[in-house]
Image (cartoon, coloured by chain):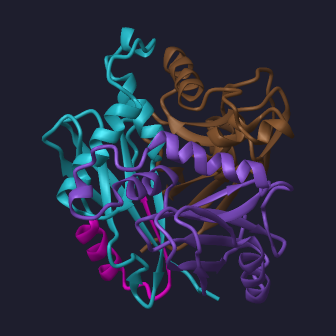
Chain colours: A cyan, B purple, C brown
């Protein structure tokens, strides 16, 4: 299943937890794995707390760790080297166990698509695999 | 299966390799996947060498990359924005293939829970999935 | 299956996309998961665009984020603390869904082994798991 997201900012955290939970619930898997995978090269998938000020801190930390336009070679072709580099820092996927029909998300964990070169239309793959957990 | 860990420091590397190996061995899976997943928002899971000085370097590098109390917005609510940001850098899970009954860990690889806001009680999910590897 | 790689530089991006695709194709899995896992402690696996200038930017960003020889404790034993620290930033594995017999890689995504302490012989595990996707 794909989750379609329309981002509205240059950098932005999109909470997709509820949509992932619905896909897992509809799949009806009791035990298994859920892989959330982004096919884009200027987005990332992260899991952390959805708190408004922390969301700002995350975007600021990325700005500071990999500043925009800091003399990158790739910017001569496309002005988004910083977006690619931030995506590499975050990674394109997260794998979460499914236990008794539910994602093993902790109390404070939410799943985010991180837009790093928006606004754009994005599509996130969510694949649910029913497995015998031992 | 869950691995319960009681951390004793504010930041700390806990080697959980042996406990993960025992879970994989007890599961009896010949081929499959092992997912190590932390449900906390201020811890990470990493795989690297367990060498005392390198462990110190890892914690120092995290301190330097994301300093504590560096004007984060979230610190107005809870003084641990740095812990969340470091957790996002490391990620909440690692997926390791199981081949012939053993984790495909390299000679120098150990699995660590990284405590980033301790001391606390932590619980790490280890799920073993027996699969037909092709 | 293992992909054997002989790196020729101290730090280097090796595009292994084609070889991973061949393993997935030969496995014949319609739906499933592909785990690309490096058993080394001074390499990483990343997914991003294979563009020559961006490849340089990635290596430069790693040099800058974790400089070589910056007073690390582990360097007293082995002069490669920076290689380990960079490997931890990138992570040892990526999990990619297989859909209709193909990796769910996006148009611009390539899979790279990142050499961080070469030149060396490296071996990357690629495990394909045929699963019923729901």
Q: Nearer the viewer, residue C113 or B63?
A: B63
Q: Quadrant of the C terminus of chain A?
A: bottom right
Q: Is residue A87 above or below residue A79?
A: below
Number of labels in the image equals 0
User: Considering only vertical position in the picture, is C59 above or below C77?
Assistant: above
Q: x%, y% of residue C19?
A: 69, 39
Quadrant where the image shows the N terminus of chain A: bottom left
Query: Residue at 49% of width from left, 20% of height from top?
Result: C54
Q: Image point 76% across, 20% down: which residue? A: C9
x, y percentage for residue C50? 53, 25
Q: Which residues are magenta?
A: A17-36
Q: Is residue B101 above or below residue B110?
A: below
Q: Is A35 colored magenta in this rendering?
A: yes
Q: Residue at x 38, y 8 (%)?
A: A76
Residue B29 lies, in percent from the top left, at 75, 81
Q: Is residue A72 left or right of residue B115?
A: left
> Viewed as shown, does residue B8 lie left or right of B99?
left
Query: Horizontal placement of C37 versus C121: left or right?
Result: left
Residue B1 versus residue C87 in the image, above or below? below
Q: Is residue C23 magenta?
A: no
User: For residue A102, what is the image quadrant?
Assistant: bottom left
In this view of the protein, can residue C26 be seen by the observer? no
Q: Quadrant of residue B35?
A: bottom right
Give x and y (percent) for residue A73.
Answer: 45, 11
Q: Residue at x 86, y 56 (%)?
A: B107
Whether residue C120 is visible to the viewer of this picture, yes or no, is yes
């Amino acid at each position: 299943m794909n989750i379609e997201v329309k981002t509205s900012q240059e950098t932005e955290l999109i909470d997709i937890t509820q949509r992932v939970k619905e896909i897992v619930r509809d799949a009806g898997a009791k035990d298994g794995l859920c892989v959330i995978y982004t096919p884009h090269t200027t987005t990332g998938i992260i899991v952390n707390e959805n708190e408004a000020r922390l969301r700002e801190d995350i975007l600021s930390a990325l700005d500071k760790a990999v500043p925009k336009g800091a003399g990158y070679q790739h910017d001569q072709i496309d002005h988004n080297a910083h977006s690619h580099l931030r995506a590499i820092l975050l990674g394109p996927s997260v794998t979460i166990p499914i236990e008794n029909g539910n994602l093993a998300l902790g109390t404070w964990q939410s799943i985010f698509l991180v837009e790093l070169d928006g606004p754009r239309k994005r599509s996130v793959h969510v694949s649910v695999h029913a497995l015998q957990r031992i």
